[in-house]
Image (tube, rainbow, N blue to C red):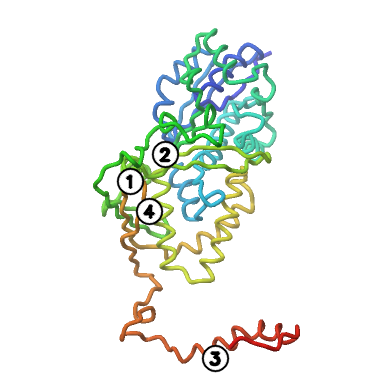
Amino acid sequence: MPKQKIVVAYSGGLDTSVMVKWLSEKYDADIITVTGDLGQKAELEGLREKAMQTGAAKFYQVDLREEFITEYVWKALKAGALYEGTYPMATAIGRPLLAKLVADIALAEGADMVAHGCTGKGNDQVRFEVGIQTLAPHMKIIAPLRTWEFKSREEEMEYAFEHKIPVKAKKDSPYSIDENLWGIAIECGILEDPTMSPPEDAYQITTNPKDAPDESAFVSITFEKGIPVKLNGVSMTGTELVSELNNTGAAHGIGRLDNIENRVVGIKSREVYEAPAATILHKAHTELEKLILDKDTFRAKQDISNKVANLIYDGLWFSPLFKSLMAFVDATQENITGEVILELYKGNLIIQSRESAYSLYSKELATYTIEDSFDHSASEGFLKIYGLPYKTMSIIAGRKEVLV
């Protein structure tokens, strides 16, 4: 009989490096590793050699950077999707694309199983498994980290050292780092204590705001239908624009986040993130929406933004509800075209200018100068009608004294 095939979602980090070796020992199967390049830089160095050295029979590495930005990140940006109001979800947005890649290759290879390196209490197990169940519903999924004998990252590191598996994590600095173009997630080690401030060595790309340049940087971002297309007047691909903003933002201490958040499985976790480009673009995009969207649409979109963020975080990117909500989002973005200029200074983002041909802002209506064109006399009747339900309730409740 031919050997079974197991396709592994492979990052080359501690967990998946150990997992490939462990699977090759535990199963009579060919191990096929699959890596998606979402812009994780150093994690890709020497990956093929490491995978083959640790027991892989076949290695795939696919450049997904532009697809990641244009088909995944821009959707989240247009939706204004920030989990629990702060986290731009670099990891969560990348997982459905990686799940799709793994499912596609598993089907093409005629694999019997797929395996991932997610823990039993993490969010990523949900994102991978729900995604794969949706895209390849008959594929068996295995999760070694939920069943194997290792009880800690330290035990995994011992196994790696014994089997000569090169890993980046060190016993004295056991951070778990997940990186892509949209941001970096850092956890484990001292970061698990929410009373402790993150050490400087936890941060991978951003300058401490205290050490950032004394001179501000100014960036101009041009949007078309909610998508950033130019940086400082220069047309760029999504990958180029995000990369440039990451470099500029990181140099000025932009994008550090220290979060307590609610995981899908019901526990709270402390996460540290770096997301310079995401922080800048979400700020600019929201400012443009404030200028262009009418009040009711803007308020409705605030609710939808929260729902979309929850769906992404909870691993439901491929759900019917996500698709339906994105239809609403796309409709709101038809006129989100214009330019926003921001100042970057020691970790702060300061809006300098917003401009759009679709702006609903009227200086003549807003001004308090002699140029004021607002009909103040109309307010009296408006307020009588607007406050009438509440006035009526007070009268019926027996409160006869009504404030004038």
Cα separation between marks 2 and 1: 22 Å
Query: Which element type, helix, strand or loop, lies under badge 3?
Result: helix
Q: Which one is earlier in the sequence, the residue at label 1 or at label 4?
A: 4
Residue found 35% across the figure and 53% down from its top: 229
The reply to whether the C-beta atoms of the residues labelled 1 and 3 are less than 8 Å apart is: no
Name which residue lies at 43% across and 44% down. Answer: 69
According to the picture, the residue beneath numbered tag 2 turns out to be: 181
Quickly name the residue at label 3: 381
**Identity of the residue furthest to the left in this view:** 215
Label 1 to label 4: alpha-carbon separation: 24 Å
Q: Residue at x 50, y 13 (%)?
A: 165
Front label number (2 vs 1)? 1
Callout 3 touching callout 4 (CB < 8 Å): no
Which image quarter is the C terminus in? bottom right
Between discs 3 and 4, the one toward the N terminus: 4
Frontmost residue, 320 versus 205: 205
Q: Residues within 10 Å of mark 1 (few under 14, many from 20)?
A: many
Pointer 2 and pointer 3: residues touching (CB < 8 Å)? no
Q: According to the image, label 1 marks what residue?
A: 346
Single out the mark in the foreground, 1 or 3: 1
**Residue type at tag 3:** Gly
Label 1 residue SS:
loop
Report, in whole angstroms, how far the alpha carbon at label 2 lies from the one at label 3.
54 Å
- Residue 118, x across and y down, in percent: 61, 29
164 in relation to 308, above or below = above
Q: Is residue 298 above or below residue 375?
A: above
**Quadrant position of the N terminus in the picture:** top right
> How many C-alpha atoms fall within 10 Å of the one at disc 4: few (<14), some, or many (≥20)?
many
